[in-house]
Amino acid sequence: MFLYSHWLKLPIVTRHHIARVFSIPKTGATEVSDNQVVKDGYKIEDIEGRLTVDALQIFLDTDETNMKYLWEDMVAKVEGRAPTAREPVSVQDPIEPQSSSAPVTVIVEEVEIIDPLPTLEEQKNQKTRRIRKPHGKKA
């Protein structure tokens, strides 16, 4: 449920862009209750099945394994922002919980994606092409 709760908080343009990149099918209608999106037509199983650690590592070209960081960096990349710079955390450093109680208002506009990011399949193919180098003739 981690992904789906974060998924619904994203702007609609970002959700559609991620769905296209990771080939997540939209199979239902959008449901809104009390001005909150409850369902957006994407199934929880499809989102969580496509946005795996492995898939995000390929998309981001990273070895990171923390899903929270992968998620943040994936959203940043899709939205055209730089990924968050993080300092290594030692085991002895206490981690302070961060909370925001201020309400957030999001205004969503429909925009055309001019230069879409490649799909995950296209990225895999590009990586394969980069790895394969022609062998030179031995003398």
Image: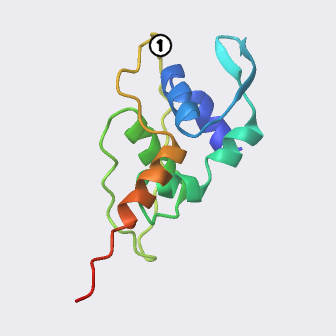
Q: Find residue 40 and report its image quarter.
A: top right
Residue furthest bottom as drawn? 139
Q: Residue at x 55, y 25 (%)?
A: 16
Q: Name, please, the residue furthest toward the front.
A: 139
Q: Residue furthest left?
A: 139
Quadrant of the image containing the N terminus: top right
Q: Which residue is mark 1?
A: 108
Instruction: Confirm whether residue 70 shows in the render.
Output: yes
User: Disc 1 marks which amino acid?
Assistant: Val
Q: Residues within 10 Å of mark 1 (few under 14, many from 20)?
A: few
Callout 1: helix, strand or loop? loop
**Residue 4 appears left or right of 104:** right
Taking the image as shown, residue 72 lies to the left or right of residue 19, namely left
Q: Position of residue 36 (x, y in %)?
A: 65, 17
Q: Nearer the viewer, residue 113 or 42?
A: 113
Q: Nearer the viewer, residue 52 or 101?
A: 52
Rendered view: 41 above or below 135: above
Q: Is residue 24 above or below residue 11?
A: below
Where residue 119 sits in the image (x, y, percent)?
Answer: 50, 40
- Quarter holding the C terminus is bottom left
Q: Residue 34 location, x and y as percent?
A: 69, 11
Q: Residue at x 40, y 75 (%)?
A: 90
Q: Residue 9's spot in the image, x, y percent?
A: 57, 29
